[in-house]
């Protein structure tokens, strides 16, 4: 069977894109990244894609009258290239419910908090301000409501004394770069079954131990 074709949608630096490109560069990875779309012409992730020899397309949201028009252009681009799975990786545009429904079960997003806590923006600062002892990242299937949808993978990091939004974001990103390739692998291998608000992962290895912060 041929590997599913993946489009990664970005708006910025694209470190998660890089993690997906690196993973997909290996022969035994079960998906191909064949397309990178940015809504911003200056996104550094476009350079990363070009360096990896992957096709890039800029669909600038500023040249469309409405969200629906922008999403229709996105959809045409994806279908013209027979894309099977979409990965949102720092793609900072809300998508219309019609678009989301059209890609139901085939679109992943990564978010830098342990959802359902801290949806939206400025999530690292909000986790610090709330006094959370742990934060992390979530890779989930996309549903029409922002930062909701069945969770595929989460990774946890401690919040440390003296953390700023930047130091916490950097710690979370290290885990993002592990979690996203894993989540895409699970979806591409057909091991993710959606069951209402949750997923069941076939043959999942769960880490056994709990974590405490502080440790003593
Ligand atoms: C990532 O930390 C990702 O979790 C976040 O944007 C960053 C993009 O970084 N996404 C969101 O906040 C979406 N709600 P990258 O361009 O280096 O991958």
Image: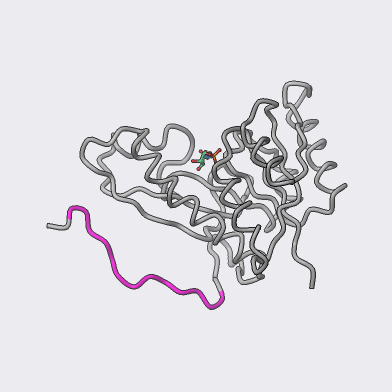
Query: In this figure, what is the number of numbered marks?
Result: 0
- Vertical position of residue 40 compared to residue 16: above or below: above
> Residue 3 versus residue 99: which sits nearer the camera?
3
- Image position, residue 201 (x, y; %): 55, 71
Query: Can you give x and y, in whole percent of width and height, for residue 180 in the image?
Result: 54, 54
| Residue placed most toward the observer, 20 or 179 | 20
**Residue 90 coordinates in the image, percent (x, y):** 57, 39
Q: Residue at x 79, y 73 (%)?
A: 1
Magenta stretch holds residue 193: no
Say whether residue 76 is left or right of residue 160: right
**Up/down of 59 relative to 17, above or below:** above
Say which residue appears at 21% left-offset and 54% top-offset. 213
Confirm whether the magenta stretch covers residue 213.
yes
Residue 160 horizontal side relative to residue 125, left or right: left
Q: How is the image coloured?
A: one colour
Give the residue drawn at x 60%, y 68%.
192
Within the image, what quadrant is residue 169 found in?
top left
> Which residue corresponds to the image point at 69% horizontal and 50% vertical from the top-left?
86
Residue 44 sits in quarter? top right
Residue at the far front in the pictured view: 51
Q: The C terminus appears in which quarter of the rendering?
A: bottom left
Give percent across and percent down for residue 207: 38, 70
Query: In which quadrant of the rendered view does residue 61 lie?
Result: top right
**Magenta highlight range:** 202-214
Q: Please determine whether, in this image, residue 173 is positioned above or below residue 215.
A: above
In the picture, measured across the screen, residue 138 lies left or right of residue 24, that is: left
Residue sitting at the far left: 216
Magenta stretch, main secondary structure, is loop
Residue projecting furthest to the right: 80
Foreground residue, 177 or 85? Answer: 177
């Amino acid at each position: 069977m041929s590997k599913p074709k993946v489009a990664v949608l970005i708006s910025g630096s694209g470190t998660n894109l890089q993690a997906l490109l690196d993973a997909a560069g290996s022969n035994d990875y079960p998906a191909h990244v064949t397309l990178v779309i940015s809504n911003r012409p200056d996104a550094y992730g476009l350079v990363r894609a070009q360096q990896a020899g992957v096709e890039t397309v800029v669909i600038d949201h500023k040249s469309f009258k409405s969200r629906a028009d922008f999403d229709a252009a996105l959809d045409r681009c994806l279908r013209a290239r027979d894309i099977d799975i979409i990965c949102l990786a720092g793609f900072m545009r809300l998508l219309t419910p019609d678009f989301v429904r059209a890609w139901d079960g085939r679109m992943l997003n990564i978010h830098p908090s342990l959802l359902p806590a801290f949806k939206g923006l400025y999530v690292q600062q909000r986790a610090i301000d709330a006094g959370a002892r742990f934060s992390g990242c979530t890779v989930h299937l996309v549903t029409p409501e922002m930062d909701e949808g069945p969770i595929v993978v989460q990774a946890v990091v401690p919040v440390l004394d003296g953390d700023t939004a930047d130091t916490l974001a950097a710690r979370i990103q290290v885990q993002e770069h592990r979690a996203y390739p894993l989540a895409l692998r699970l979806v591409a291998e057909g091991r993710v079954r959606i069951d209402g608000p949750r997923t069941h992962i076939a043959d999942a290895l769960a880490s056994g131990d709990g974590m405490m912060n502080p440790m003593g």
